[in-house]
Amino acid sequence: MTNTRDGRYRLADALTRVVARDGITGVSVRSVATEASVSGGTVQHHFPTRAEMILYAMEWTSTQVEHRLVSAPRWGDVREWTRGILLDLLPLSADRRQEHAVWLAFVAHADTHPLLAQLKRQTSTKLLELYSDIVRARRGAPARTKPTNDDYDIDVDAVLLQSFVDGLSLHLADLELDKAAKVGPALLDRYLALAVDNVG
């Protein structure tokens, strides 16, 4: 018998597929139940309200991405493993493109509910910390202790890197996958060379 946690995971996974295909407006007890091949009663058992279901799916998606990024290798050539993490954030495959579309839909919907808006802010903060770690690693900066002028520069450049990756993701999502797979890494490498690595 499927336990409660697995049941909620299954429904969250089904909901993300519905969102990727039909957007947030396509989310209903019936659509999620059909996607997950369960009854409407099963969906309502786990999620009494639509808002609770969307919040859980947004948390679930955020957690999946976070776990993947945390488990990414962080050894060997610094520029290679930091590049690998950044490439993993771009919609360069069918799975990443679906993930990107789902997250955009969640983010656009977040302002309709305070808990969704809070999760959006928390996720953005965690990502900014990741970008800051990447800039720090690529520049060989020591671990943060007390604030310095270098820390300020790193924090500003982390915001710029985050903005670049967000914008690049939107651009790549409009391209055919094979073209995105060629263009994305090249544009990322150029930005890193100009704005992250090549600093005086």
Image: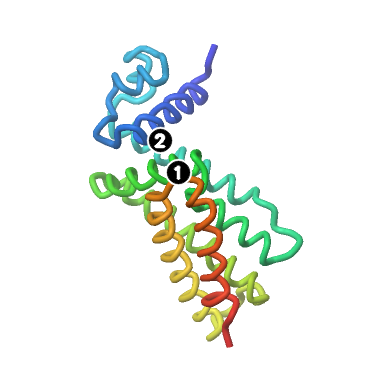
**Mark whose residue sits in front, 2 or 1:** 1
In this figure, which colouring scheme has been used for the structure?
Answer: rainbow
Q: Residue at x 24, y 34 (%)?
A: 25
Expressed as whole percent of the image width and height from the top left, the position of residue 11 reads: 42, 25
Secondary structure under the numbered disc 2 in the rendered image: helix
* Circle 2/circle 1 CB separation < 8 Å: no
Mark 1 neighbour density, 10 Å: few (under 14) some (14–19) many (20 or more): many
Q: Which residue is mark 1?
A: 97
Is residue 22 placed above or below 130 in the rendered structure? above
Q: Nearer the viewer, residue 195 or 43?
A: 195
In the displayed image of the protein, which residue is found farthest to the right? Answer: 76
Q: Amino acid at mark 1?
A: Arg
Is 75 on the left-hand or right-hand side of 137? right
Q: Residue at x 49, y 74 (%)?
A: 157
On the rendered image, what quadrant is the N terminus found in?
top right
Is residue 81 placed above or below 14 in the rendered structure? below
Mark 2 neighbour density, 10 Å: few (under 14) some (14–19) many (20 or more): many
**Is tag 2's residue or tag 1's residue first in the polypeptide sequence?**
2
Expressed as whole percent of the image width and height from the top left, the position of residue 197 reads: 60, 76
Q: Which residue is mark 2?
A: 57
Q: Amino acid at mark 2?
A: Ala
Q: Residue at x 61, y 51 (%)?
A: 70
